[in-house]
Amino acid sequence: MRHGKKGRKFGRERGQRRAFLKGLLNNLIMRENIETTEPRAKELRPKMEKLLTLAKKQTMASFRLLLSRLPKQSAQKLYYEIAPRYVDRKGGYLRIIKGMKRRKRDSAKMAIIEFV
């Protein structure tokens, strides 16, 4: 049984999966929207929203936590540029738009994830 086991594996081991999600988070922050598969977008949203809530606190401790979890450039962009936009917003910082097309090689459902 899978009780209490949340998160998708994406066919990767733990370290590879963490690096993969960190790369997706980095791309999402730097570009502010990315096109990826639907399961990846759904896995990315809660992680990004938690990081953005952390960045909204605007404390040195929260900035250091961001630096430990993200590359330096994306942590700075999230803290200084993106987080101040959402000071008045209580949650729901990201939008997932499901695409009509599927990826050609494996027919995976595609989606666009972006900041609201």
Image (cartoon, rainbow, N blue to C red):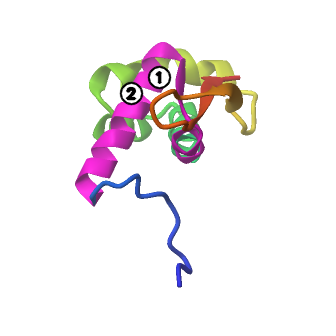
Is residue 88 one of those drawn in magenta?
no
Q: Quadrant of the C terminus?
A: top right
Amino acid type, residue under disc 2 in the picture: Asn
For this orientation, the residue located farthest to the bottom is 1
Image point (35%, 38%), residue name: 22
Q: CA distance from mark 1 to mark 2?
A: 5 Å
In the displayed structure image, the side of residue 45 where residue 65 appears, left or right: left
The residue indicated by pointer 1 is 29
The residue indicated by pointer 2 is 26
Image point (30%, 54%), residue name: 12
Q: In terms of secondary structure, where does tag 1 sit?
A: helix
Q: In terms of secondary structure, where does tag 2 sit?
A: helix
Q: Position of residue 78 (x, y in %)?
A: 47, 24
Q: Residues within 10 Å of mark 2 (few under 14, many from 20)?
A: many
Q: Residues within 10 Å of mark 1 (few under 14, many from 20)?
A: many
As displayed, is residue 17 above or below residue 105?
A: below
For this orientation, the residue located farthest to the left is 15
Q: Main secondary structure of the magenta part?
A: helix
Is residue 30 one of those drawn in magenta?
yes
Q: Position of residue 96 (x, y in %)?
A: 68, 32
Question: On residue 95, which mark appears?
Answer: none
Please tell me which residue lies in front, 93 or 38. 38
Please tell me which residue lies in front, 63 or 44. 44
Q: Position of residue 8 (x, y in %)?
A: 48, 57
Span colored in magenta = 14-43
Query: On the image, which quarter does residue 9 sit in?
Result: bottom left
In the displayed structure image, the side of residue 16 where residue 97 appears, left or right: right
As displayed, is residue 4 above or below residue 22?
A: below
Callout 1–callout 2 Cβ contact below 8 Å: yes
Viewer can see residue 65: no
Q: Position of residue 52 (x, y in %)?
A: 55, 35
Viewer can see residue 19: yes
